Amino acid sequence: MKVLVIGSGAREHALCRSMSLDPDVTALHCAPGNAGIAEVAELHAVDALDGAAVTALAQKLEAGLVVVGPEAPLVAGVADAVRAAGIPVFGPSGEAAQLEGSKAFAKDVMAGAGVPTARSYVCTNAAEIDEALDAFGAPYVVKDDGLAAGKGVVVTDDIEEARAHAKACERVVIEEFLDGPEVSLFAITDGTTVVPLQPAQDFKRALDNDEGPNTGGMGAYSPLPWADPKLVSEVLDTVLQPTVDEMARRGTPFSGLLYAGLAITSRGVRVIEFNARFGDPETQVVLARLRTPLAGVLLASADGTLADLEPLRWSEDAAVTVVVASHNYPDTPRTGDPITGLDEVAAQDAPNAYVLHAGTKRDGGSGAVVSAGGRVLSVTAVGGDLTQARERAYAAVDRIGLDGSQHRTDIAAKAASGH
């Protein structure tokens, strides 16, 4: 089949890489893509938020499947436009994507589905904000109701910082702090059947030891050696299936990728948030371990046949991804710097380690690959265990040159050492 992937980040590169290895994929296209994706897919210019433009491109390419990567096009209803043209699309409708597009909507769905989550208040003015902050106390958890590219959440002991973030949002969700480690669990669904993937853990803070500002994610690993073996089945039964059933009951069935951000608290599993698409950088490690060809699984979600699918096959290997970010990220990043060492990684570290591009492009004049965003590369490696996967990932990171770049040195370190 011919596949068109929408998006331009490392998540989309991971999706394209997996589908480029899928024998059923006869042609692979990506719009708008990036410099790394260009090596495995044909790139096309498109406004990813313009449903009519995306649909026209899919029709021109005779795509048999469209995969919408990022959240903003999903919330904008791009999947609806493609679906209306009769083209199978992996990704929820604009209405169903409100599970990510509005924190308040997600809380309402969780209440209806009986899904365990943090207690919370939705606030729209200063008085409500102060009342909610006072009710929960520190540490304060303040979430912008709308999309904020993974950076709309502030967790702080400083009430003034919490208040300032809350007042900068039109609508804000203030909730109780959830203790315990966090887990990302993805599930593919067609609106009825739910197929969970393997869990991963990502690292949100910019600096080692979980210090510094919140980011879109600085690295991830899978599997989680410390997690309860029953975690996936428990979350399927208490979170994922009830949420998909509740969305169907409301007349807004959810198909595509349902991502549950979870806290494993002293009182049990609680949902921190839902996303309506593959998470970045967790996708990089989850897909590194998936042995079942990806395109058929995504097509089964799009055409409602997930129940007929064989159980997914997984590698026993561990996977680690380390994000190389540009100077000043997560504030306004510096871009346009040349990136070196990519050929060396391909020559010396493949196939155990490889580079997935996030914010990159080819310089028009020199043809060199240059930085074009905050998170520039996701260096991903697999190994027999987390220790070996870490060693391979960081060996590859060391080959890469990007002036002023930054990365965390402790991705998966605690899990690898058994802590």
Image (cartoon, rainbow, N blue to C red):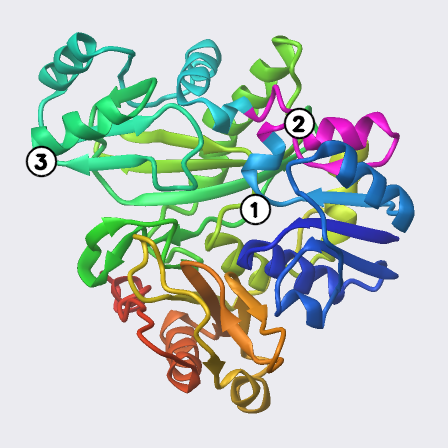
Residue 13: name its quadrant.
bottom right
Secondary structure under tag 3 reads: loop
Task: Give the magenta range.
Answer: 75-97
Mark seen at residue 157: 3
Question: Neighbour class for label 2 at 10 Å: few (<14), some, many (≥20)?
Answer: many
Secondary structure under tag 1 reads: loop
Residue 373 magenta-drawn?
A: no
Q: Is 163 drawn above or below residue 113 in the view shown? A: below
- Left/right placement of residue 347 relative to residue 151 reads right
Secondary structure under tag 2 reads: loop
Q: Provide residue 272's location: percent of width, then percent of height.
A: 35, 31
**The disc labelled 1 sits on which kind of residue?**
Leu
| Distance (Cα) linking label 3 and label 2 | 37 Å
Q: Earlier in the sequence, mark 2 or mark 1?
A: 2
**The disc labelled 2 sits on which kind of residue?**
Gly
- Nearest the viewer among 128 and 299 is 128
- Nearest the viewer among 146 and 207 is 146
